[in-house]
Image (spheres, rainbow, N blue to C red):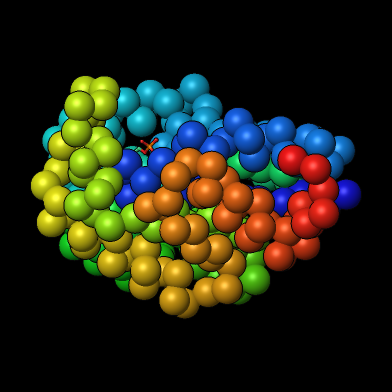
Amino acid sequence: MKGLFLTLEGIDGAGKSSHIDALEALFKAEGRQVTRTREPGGTPIAEILRTMILEQPMDPLTESLLVFAARRDHVVRVIEPALARGDVVLCDRFTDATFAYQGAGRGFDPAVLSMLEQWVQGGGRSAGPEALLQPDVTLWFDLAPELAAERLAGARLPDKFESQPVEFFRQVAAGYAQRAAGTSRFLRIDASQSRDQVWQQVEAALAGRGLVASRIGRAS
Ligand code: TMP
């Protein structure tokens, strides 16, 4: 069976991570092996880098280099082997987050990010665009930054990104919208709805792409 690379994206507070358990169960019910992972992170080295990235102030180039260093280790050790086995890889964030947070949020040069992407997910400078590892499908949990800030307020102790002002998240949200406009792999989920309604949208979006069996007519 062919591997499926599925990522979850959205600004902090959009609620994407709360659907990962259900996504895993959904694909397992379809008889698939599932690898669950996240970025930054997913390997021992990448988890150490995650702590640095989320806790230490640093300039945007350092941050981008660390994010892509963590990603390289993660791609080579976890994502590519899982896809080669035919697994469904459920990855909480991937490179779209780098373009949204470091690119749009921090204002870092997207051309440099594209170069790093080519090195980390492709075969380096000389490889063609077909060599680039990209998600097959990206669930984009879209939520107004003001609503996300309300949801985050009073939650756990905020990390370096979560404690950014709402204006930062406006830019990040615009970055996601721009990424989504350029590709058909994004499935937009209206994350302002209740958790149950959001999950129904997720199931319907995946069924609409033929990635899971349609739930229409099935008892829930
Ligand atoms: P999480 O809270 O969804 O696990 O994400 C961790 C934080 O890291 C989140 O605020 C977004 C940020 N991040 C980046 O800034 N760049 C990246 O490339 C990734 C993957 C995450």
The answer to whether 170 is drawn above or below residue 77 in the figure is below
Residue 19 x %, y %: 54, 38
Does residue 122 appear in this view? no
- In this rendered view, identify the residue nearer to me: 130 or 10: 10
The structure residue drawn at horizontal position 82% and vertical position 54%, both measured from the top left corner, is 217
Going 36% across and 31% down the picture, which residue do you hit?
Answer: 50
179 to 54, vertically: above or below: below
Residue 141 drawn at (x, y percent): 44, 53
Residue occupying the point 21% across, 23% down: 157
The image quarter in which residue 29 lies:
top right
Question: Which residue shows up at 80% across the image and 43% down it?
Answer: 219
Q: In this rendered view, identify the residue nearer to me: 198 or 54.
A: 198
Seen in the image, is 21 located left or right of residue 164? right
- In the image shown, does 156 or 51 lie closer to the viewer? 156
Q: Residue 51 in the image: state x and y as whole percent.
A: 31, 26
208 versus 21 height, above or below: below
Image quadrant occupied by the C terminus: top right
- Nearest the eye: 156 or 88: 156
Left or right: 213 as drawn, with respect to 16: right
